[in-house]
Each structure stands twice: as structure tokens, then as C-alpha cells.
Amino acid sequence: MSATVLYMSMSLDGFIAGPNDGPGNGLGDNGHCLHEWLPPVVKTNRRALARGEAGVNGQIVDEFLDTGAVVAGRGTFEPAGGWGGDHHDGVPIFILSRRDPESEPGQWPLVTYINDVEIAMSAAKRAAGDKNVLVHGAGTAQLALAAGVLDEFEIHLIPVLLGQGRRLFDTLGPEHIELERTRVLEGEHGVTHLHYRVQR
């Protein structure tokens, strides 16, 4: 059964970006260290995402490249240059947005803008068929958790303390959310891949 899965690199103290993140500095100051576990081709050219890399980290890359749709917020999508309109393999991309896109409509035919997280997740699941949906972005994850439409997390825990920046769960409400840990993988370069299922 298709699941919505957040894939996120995070520092040991809970940050997904360093301070001063924004246009031209999407991961913030020193935030690049959160993605050094990725194979070089993945880090340098998203259009040349590499499958079949050796080791545990390669397995994780293969998993997120086997997803059938992507859901993200504008805060993730725009600093990434919209991934050139194609995140991977021509899968549909659903972007959460409360305002009209600044780019010319139709510029990227794989991209659909939706202003409701439940509708976005439902549309992405339909589009993905029997494959999972790749979820990107802290804001999107928090909205999806609150709405009960985020199924799983894959957290890539990096052995670094950033001290400040943007946290993954900064603005979560007071809801008590139980998680079931379903997998722990020790990857290369010190990263630990932690997989959780949201309990409902």
C-alpha cells in the first residue's frame, strides 16, 4: 500500500538547515554538512540522480528514487530551483502554496500547485499508484502530521550539532504523536538512517 514518507537529513540537535537560510543559501550557513552522506552525483546534479550506489546510503537513495510522486512546500521547492521541473524520473510534483506561482503557469508540466495539504497528499497518492510518495520540507511535514496524512519518516541523522538554524519540528502543536521505529541502518560517513511509522 502506498505511503507518504518524509525523507529528511537532520543534525543531532534537530536542525534541517543552518542559520541564515534563504534564496542563494537554501541550507543556511554550514547546512551543506547535512547532505554530505549523499553520493557525489546526487549532491551536485539533481538531474543525474544515481541509482545502484554501493552501501547503505546507496540503498536509501534507491528507495527515495523509487517513489511515484513528490509533495513539498515552496520553501523547499523554490530554493532548489524547482529541481528544474523534474525531481526524478518524471514523477508528478505537488507544491503546497497559498498564493499563485511566480513562475509562468505551464512552465513545468509535472508541477501542480495546491493550497491544502490533505488534497495534495491524496492527489500525490493517486498519482503514485502503488509506489510511495516522497515528502520534502519541514513546513509540509508539520502540516501533514497535524492533518493525519503523513505516514512515515526516514530521518538521516547526522553526527553534528548546528546550534541554530531551522528545526524540523519547530512549530508542531501540542498533539501527542506516537511513532513506531521500524528500522535503523548505520550508513557510511557517520549517518544513521532511522525509519518511523506514525501511529494512528
Image (cartoon, grey):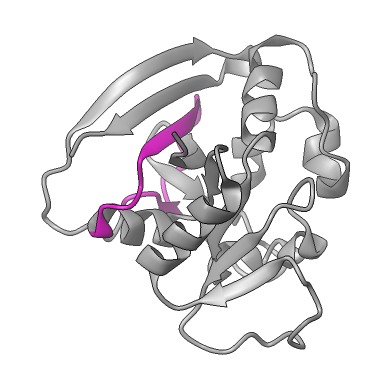
| Left or right of 14 in this view: 177 | left
Total numbered badges shown on the rendered structure: 0
On whether residue 43 falls in the magenta region, the answer is no
Name the quadrant containing residue 20. Answer: bottom right
Residue visible at 52% across and 39% down in the picture: 7
Quadrant of the rendered image containing residue 81: bottom right
Q: Vertically, is 194 above or below 28?
A: above
* Residue displayed at 78% across by 57% down: 86
- Where residue 110 sits: x, y (%)? 73, 65
Q: Position of residue 95 (x, y in %)?
A: 56, 68
Residue drawn at x 68%, y 28% is 61
Q: Nearer the viewer, residue 145 or 168?
A: 145
Q: Is residue 167 visible?
A: yes
Of the 4 image quadrants, the one containing the C terminus is top left
Pick the front one: 133 or 28: 133
Left or right for 139, reference 37: left
The answer to whether 174 is drawn above or below residue 7 in the figure is below
x and y percentages locating residue 34 in the rendered image? 59, 37
Q: Is residue 37 visible?
A: no
Question: Range of the magenta residues?
Answer: 147-169
Which quadrant of the rendered structure holds the N terminus? Answer: top left
Which residue: 51% across, 41% down? Answer: 8
> Residue 29, position in %: x, y?
61, 53
Q: Does the magenta segment cover residue 153?
A: yes
